[in-house]
Image: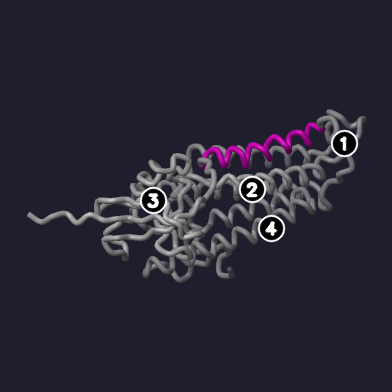
Amino acid sequence: MSRTTFFEVEVLDGRTRQQLCFLDKVEPHATIGEIKSLFHKSYQQLYPARQDLKLDPKGKSLRDDDVLQNLPVGTTATIYFKDLGPQVGWTMVFLAEYLGPLFIYLLFYFRAPYIYSHQDVFTSSPYSVVTLACACHTCHYIKRLIEAIFVHRFSHGTMPLRTIVRNCVYYWAFSAWLAFYINHPLYTPPSYGDMQVNYALAIFVLCELGNFSIHVALNNLKAEGGPKCRRFPHPTKNPFTWLFFFVSCPNYTYEVGAWASFSVMTQCLPVALFTFLAFIQMTIWAKGKHKTYSREFKDYPQLRMPIIPLLL
């Protein structure tokens, strides 16, 4: 009978190179996730989600499902640790990010006290576009909350607390800024009246439906293939998913389309600025995802672009 060769794992601080932990007789088929659990026994405050382990301090982070014996290490492995800081689950992340804008906007819509002048407290705008804008904004964030709770599947279970704070400041502040102007007593409706509002509203609704359809399709793909199955998404019978023929991340395409139409519908500069910044960020994410698909799958469709069909 062949004897099992156990591994010795030395965990060093990635910054100071000081030894934090020495794990003896580790099974060769142990995963990085299991090593994190062993490390957690020595440092109770450093739960697995807070740990970032690497083979090189400046290298790539190891995945939880990486197997020790498959890594380029000897029977004595040196792993470098970085503290990611306090972590929060993704569901709580989205609740924090999206509940804020939802309620903040409604405070401005109902003109709560101390926002506008005293005589405007709890009054309503005479323009129907203001009510439509409130309905669109509210539905958008309710949709996001529903997706976060019932649709999305996350490859990483948590997000650093400091990142959540930054994201909340971004979403909450922009929501307050655009809500202040759209619901302002001096707000005037768009230049081309109902025609501009109605066309933009129709596009907004279509983009919201498209965005939701893509998220459901991505969720179904992960559910069918399992966490370890790697496949790239394809169009389904749902016409909204046919945008997969042309772009790698149609969820971002629809998201930008929804905010662009919301900008046209309200003819509000803060909304346009928010849309522009969101487009820049989503383009960066889409390019990264597109590059990953192209590198990982040799049969990946060459016609697809990251976010804008045939252009970008």
Disc 4 crowd rating (10 Å Cα; few below 14, some 14-19, many 20+) is: few
How are the colours assigned in the image?
A: one colour
Say left or right for 17 vs 211: left
Q: Quadrant of residue 125?
A: top right
Main SS of the magenta part reads helix
**Is residue 101 a member of the stretch shown in magenta?**
yes
Q: Can you see residue 217?
A: no
Residue at mark 1 to residue at mark 4: CA–CA distance: 27 Å
Inspect the image, locate mark 1, and give the three-letter code of the amino acid beneath it.
Answer: Tyr
Q: Which label number is shown at residue 72?
A: none
Percent across and percent down for residue 47 are 45, 42
Inspect the image, locate mark 3, and give the three-letter code of the amino acid beneath it.
Answer: Cys
Q: Look at mark 3 in the image and give the residue it sits on.
A: 21
Q: Earlier in the sequence, mark 4 or mark 3?
A: 3
The quadrant of the rendering that contains the N terminus is bottom left
Residue drawn at (46%, 56%), measured in percent from left and top?
Answer: 13
Q: Which label number is shown at residue 167?
A: 2
